Image (cartoon, coloured by chain):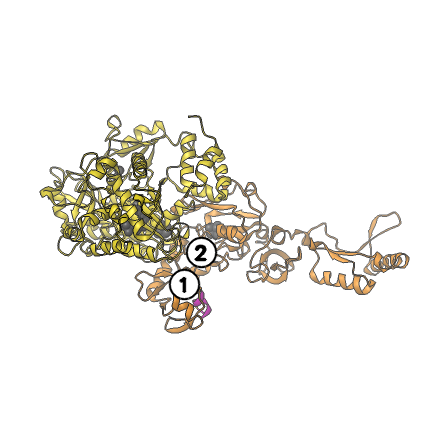
Amino acid sequence: MSDRQAGAGQATLVIDGAEVAFEPGESLFEVSARVGKRLPSLCYDERLEAFGACRLCVVEVEGIRNPVASCTTLAADGMVVTTSSAEVEAWRKTLVEMVASENREVEVDPLRGHASQELSRLVARYDAVPGRFAGEPSGKSREDDGNPFLLRDYDLCISCYRCVRVCAEQQGDHAIGIANRGFETRITTEFDGELRDSACVFCGQCVQTCPTGALADRKAMRGVDVPGEIEKTRTICPYCGVGCSVDLMTKGDKLVGVQPAMDGPANKGALCVKGQFAFDFVQHEDRLAHPMVRNDDGELVRASWDEALDRAAKGFRGVVERHGRHAVYGVASGRAPHEAAYLMQKWIRTGFGTNFIDNCSRA
Amino acid sequence: MSRLDDNDLLERFRKLPAPLLPLLHAFHERDGLVSEEALEALSEGLHIPRAELYGTLTFYHHLSRIPGGQAAPRVCTGPICRYKGGPEILEALRKDGATPMPCAGRCDEPVPVLFGNEVRVGSSVPELLSRPSPLPVPNPGAVEECVFAEIREPDRASLVGYERTGGYEALRRCTAGLRPSELIDLVAESGLAGRGGAGFPTARKWSAVAEATGGPKTIVANADEGEPGCFKDRVLMDHDPHALIEGMCLAAHATGASRGFIYLRYEYPETLAILEKALDEARAAGHLGDRIHGSGFSFEIHLRRGAGAYICGEETSLLNSLEGKHPFPRNRPPFPVTHGYEGTPTAVNNVETLCSVAPIVRKGVEWYQSLGLAENAGTKLISLSGDIQRPGNYEVPLGLPLQTLLADWAGGPPEGRRIQAVTMAGLSGGFLAGADLDVDLDEPGIRSKGSFLGAGGIMVFDDSRDMVQVAHGAMEFFAEESCGKCFPCRIGTRRLAERLAQSHGPRDLATWQQEARELSVVMRATSACGLGQAAPLVVESLMKYFPEELEQSLVSGWSGGNDER
Ligand SMILES: Cc1cc2nc3c(=O)[nH]c(=O)nc-3n(C[C@H](O)[C@H](O)[C@H](O)COP(=O)(O)O)c2cc1C
Ligand code: SF4
Ligand code: SF4
Ligand code: FES
């Protein structure tokens, strides 16, 4: 161990015949990924402490009798590692077939969640036959949980505990835990109740890390039958000042869902309940679709853009003339796009010459 | 005594080390169950999130969440008891809310039934009787023993009796100046290796703890003895409890540890009381506590009761259980010798291992080594049970031929029967049968047959037993006791159990064997702990020794799938 500290920077190991330098504290999984060998995994989420449950990432290390889980094994100077011998690849295929055998289905709609395709991708990668090792399925969906955000479809659960760990480690919420043991393990809230009676804050992070879609985004799933391919557009959530990166998911011109960006510098896959689930206003039927102005009776009536803009300009100009430029105060909406917020402050600052500009997202 | 309220209980235990288990038991016994209110109080008092605590509670077999559940009978339906009246007793006691439990460590006098904190044994309901565990019979030909040498001395379980027969002499030598390094050297020379299953050299473990930085250092006596067919630690603790205490003190002296835990399985309530009394005696006599024998050496032992989980005998799962965490095994490295109980350097040792040390110090390294046969040093306790004339605990010289033990020492199979197979290492070593029964009882010998000696449980099955059914019961045990952390074990044990019960899976022998082999190989190679690595041995040895029985059973479609344990 002291060697590694002394020679930090120079420490190297051999992966599949190539010598690779590593930083102290890096796992074999991380070093492998860095040199372009993404080892298969199902319980791994780089934001979480390595857990070592799925055993798909096992590698052989010279001098150690049993293969080791690369995610929980730290790189050490002089290690000689073989990541994917034919034998290990065969075990991986068997493991994937074993996991697939516990679920009613493997192919799930990607709208279920960010990581929901992990299992089906591995089945394809290993050409695994999900029908092998048939037996009792594990997990039991909680159809009784009526919350509007998170579908708890545990028929598809493979007990990777990423949801439990993300809730504890990322969100600090500890709303869910692991009940029973062995093949009977279940994801549970306190006393096995519904999420709304638990400490859950509906941030949705469990949904986005679930590798099978067992936890699914109920809001996004309304868009499953909308025709078209899912397109993702990276942007920043406008709801508050943190600046979480999100991917807006659209099909054609319809916004179907929001997913957090795992590589978002401010959030690393985290979101709050609003950023995650509160996007219905975008396509809400009550939303204004054209300008309106008040008529002489004070009623709002449809108007052309020119008409509306003229009316607004006249109003503002009148205020400034009567009370001076600091009589104007702008508040932009957290539900407006960032471009609109930018224009708003530009307009207030340069248009009126005042710094009285704010945004409801500042709260 | 008036009923203690939640706060009294919390106050009593909160500040003690490892408070969750004793608190759970306190609520369980006060209320007859662990209620939601109790759980809320515990969550608040110990700062454990509710969902996590609820999940951990459901992990343990014996903690009931239904009214009256604590006192409801639990009937052993383990691999021996299922043939000795267990299922019938269970049926008869159903009306009292009886539930099955896995092997409860009384296989030498089946069937144990747990009524609250009392174990009664008997082969039918009217015969059920509470009685002390039987003393081991002396070896034929007076073959010398180590840990059993003094166990039959009168009053050995009391301090007076223990001291009269050499007890605490070894500890006195330490407090009078035998240095820790000298003690470790002694143990190293003796060749003593762990008796809990893995056979790790005890001196190496102790010197790793002694050399580790950080503290306070900790000694854990692993008295979980959850392996089916193992009941040797029970007899040691019941009849020679001070030997364990002295062994722990010696381990503490060697490593520099200042605190110790005994982690005792739930199914041994009488042993719990015996140990409690012995600890009090030892403290009062100055063998334990502050400044032992007036020296600079201080060491305290805390007794903790498990709650029903085989995996909690695995040392890192045990540590998590003590710490009040979900009892999954931990990833290694780091190992407990540097990062054990609450991250401190910790030696986890089996009861038998610890009990071996004082005799070695007292009688000498050469004496200990001479106890083994051929190349072997020392002895091994064997718990022998099942279809054999004289079941019980035997302390055999390492290297004793298995056949000698079975035929000469234990009287062979019942009249008119033939031994069909024996298990090794409880259930974890799978079966030995046929010509492979001609083997010496030492690790190299048993390993050469593809099995291992482990903790030394040997269960005997005569030719009246259906080995496929026995294998199914074994795999069902592993499936139910798998902690559920790692995929190969969690899924593999269930799939193998289903295939043995023929509730799922192929019906032709070739495909059946192909699938079973593939599952077995992956489980052994990739499981995260010994449970999943060893579990496939049952199936592999069934395929090796009993292919015809297996085929026959596939053809006739036996289904033990609705078997209840
Ligand atoms: C599933 C499982 C169960 C175990 N149960 C026990 C047990 O009940 N008692 C025990 O001493 N060791 C048990 N062990 C072994 C312990 O992990 C550990 O190796 C042992 O306590 C070390 O003590 P020793 O070196 O004195 O043998 C178990 C291991 C596994 C994998
Ligand atoms: S619900 Fe999803 S994330 Fe949670 S344990 Fe199951 S498969 Fe893993
Ligand atoms: S091998 Fe079994 S008992 Fe051990 S960690 Fe894995 S699931 Fe748990
Ligand atoms: S005590 Fe019943 S099988 Fe061991």
Task: Tell me, yes or no, whether the highlighted magenta stretch contains residue B324.
Answer: no
Of badges 1 and 2, nearer the viewer stands 1
**Percent x, y for residue B116?**
35, 31
The picture quadrant for ligand 4 comes to top left
Amino acid carrying mark 1 in the image: Leu
Q: Is residue B565 above or below residue B130?
A: below
In front here: B90 or B188? B188
How far apart are labels 1 and 2 at the CA level? 17 Å
Work out which quarter of the rendered image holds the N terminus of chain A and state it. Answer: bottom left
Chain A palette colour: orange
Amino acid carrying mark 2 in the image: Cys
Q: Which segment is the magenta one?
A: A29-36
Q: Chain of mark 1?
A: A
Q: Is residue B113 above or below residue B216?
A: above
Q: Which residue is mark 2?
A: A43
Task: Tell me, yes or no, whether the highlighted magenta stretch contains residue A30.
Answer: yes
